[in-house]
Image (cartoon, rainbow, N blue to C red):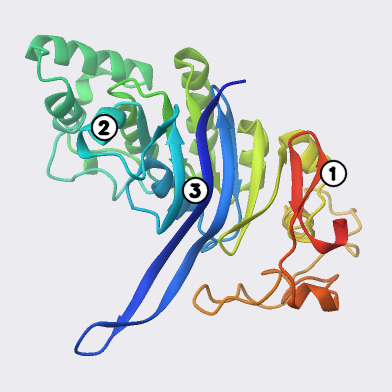
């Protein structure tokens, strides 16, 4: 398989500044030296607790926010050091579907204006008639009719707004899409419709996804591989079936144990329950970042940051227990 996205040693820190002279007194360590690849036509899931750096990773991969250091290549083109002309060209190939459909659409613009904007910026040679024809095709692709073109976002339900957000992401026929928790703000009855729509579009348009979510059931259904993130680090990455059937990192095991089981007779005494809260990304723990909550913690965990252990093809985890 061809590598479409290559992320190497990505770091993102947000400075903390105080005082009259706006002096930096610290930093929020959002992403800590992560590396991963996404293959053409693949869906890579990125899962973890809120605040672990999932959305920041997606935005750095797209170049929406600049990383502190590291490399991001899309189709062998380095975007972290690319000039504005190259970035504008790449914008047509990569898009994002935002988490909240209530805040991601401009309330002062009609659906027609929202969907036409990318064509105005990137496809200036198209006539108004050609653009209008493409808008109708886009709406049909996401299961909506052309009658919605002159309506405003507040006139739609959450699921309909997310369909409009998906249509906007598809306007320029991108090859890569970051889906940033695209169903978490929707009713449970609507989530399946949007997930099935994203799957259908992936197959029809040969899309590549980075699918960000905290819902492990959704991740299992839509993703080919899964990367588990904790406090800015990827602690385990594996093909979906292997990760769910044979999780190796204690954090991955705890996450999978937390999934509700619709069986009142199931024995839950063996469940892994993590103690304490996620540590602050301002003052990071030493050694293994998970040692403050790990049920299997050893002396070495607080002193030495573990290396990745290759468990099988495409399956690796970062834990001293595996050495």
Above or below — where is 298 with respect to 135? below
- Categorize mark 2 by other alpha carbons within 10 Å: few (<14), some (14-19), many (20+): few
Above or below — where is 284 with respect to 99? below
Q: Earlier in the sequence, mark 3 or mark 2?
A: 2
The residue that disc 1 covers is 246
Horizontal arrangement in the rendering, residue 234 relative to residue 161 (left or right): right
Could you tell me if the residues under marks 3 and 1 are in contact, i.e. CB atoms within 8 Å? no
Mark 3 or 2, closer to the camera: 2
Nearer to the camera, 128 or 175: 175
x then y, percent, for residue 5: 50, 33
Above or below — where is 195 with respect to 322? above
Q: Which SS class for mark 3? A: loop
Nearer to the camera, 250 or 62: 62
Residue plotted at (21% across, 39% down):
84
Mark 3 or 1, closer to the camera: 1
The residue that disc 2 covers is 86
The residue that disc 3 covers is 184
Q: Which SS class for mark 1? A: loop
x then y, percent, for residue 250: 79, 60
x then y, percent, for residue 129: 10, 10
Residue plotted at (90% across, 65% down):
269
Quadrant of res 251: bottom right
């Amino acid at each position: 398989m061809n590598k479409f996205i290559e992320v190497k040693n990505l770091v993102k820190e947000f400075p903390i500044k105080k005082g009259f002279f706006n002096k930096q007194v610290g930093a929020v360590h959002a992403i800590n030296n992560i590396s991963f690849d996404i293959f053409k036509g693949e869906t890579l899931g990125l899962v973890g607790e809120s605040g672990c750096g999932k959305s920041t990773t997606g935005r750095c991969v797209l170049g929406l926010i600049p990383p502190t250091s590291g490399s991001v290549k899309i189709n062998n083109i380095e975007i972290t050091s690319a000039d504005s002309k190259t970035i504008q060209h790449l914008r047509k190939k990569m898009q994002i579907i935002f988490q909240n459909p209530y805040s991601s659409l401009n309330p002062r613009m009609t659906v027609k204006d929202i969907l036409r904007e990318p064509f105005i910026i990137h496809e200036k040679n198209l006539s108004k008639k050609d653009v209008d024809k493409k808008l109708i095709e886009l709406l049909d692709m996401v299961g909506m009719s052309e009658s919605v073109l002159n309506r405003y976002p507040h006139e739609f339900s959450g699921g309909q707004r997310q369909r409009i957000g998906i249509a906007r992401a598809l306007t320029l026929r991108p090859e890569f899409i970051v889906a940033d928790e695209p169903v978490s703000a929707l009713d449970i009855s609507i989530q399946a419709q949007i997930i099935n729509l994203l799957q259908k579009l992936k197959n029809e348009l040969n899309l590549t996804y980075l699918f960000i979510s905290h819902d492990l059931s959704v991740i299992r259904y839509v993703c080919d591989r899964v990367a588990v993130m904790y406090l800015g680090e990827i602690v385990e990455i594996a093909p979906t079936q292997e990760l769910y059937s044979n999780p190796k990192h204690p954090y991955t095991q705890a996450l999978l144990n937390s999934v509700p089981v619709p069986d009142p007779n199931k024995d839950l005494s063996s469940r892994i329950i993590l103690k304490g809260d996620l540590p602050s990304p301002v003052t990071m723990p030493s050694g293994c970042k998970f040692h403050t909550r790990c049920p299997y913690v050893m002396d070495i965990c607080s002193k030495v940051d573990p290396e990745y252990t290759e468990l099988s093809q495409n399956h690796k985890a970062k834990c001293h227990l595996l050495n």
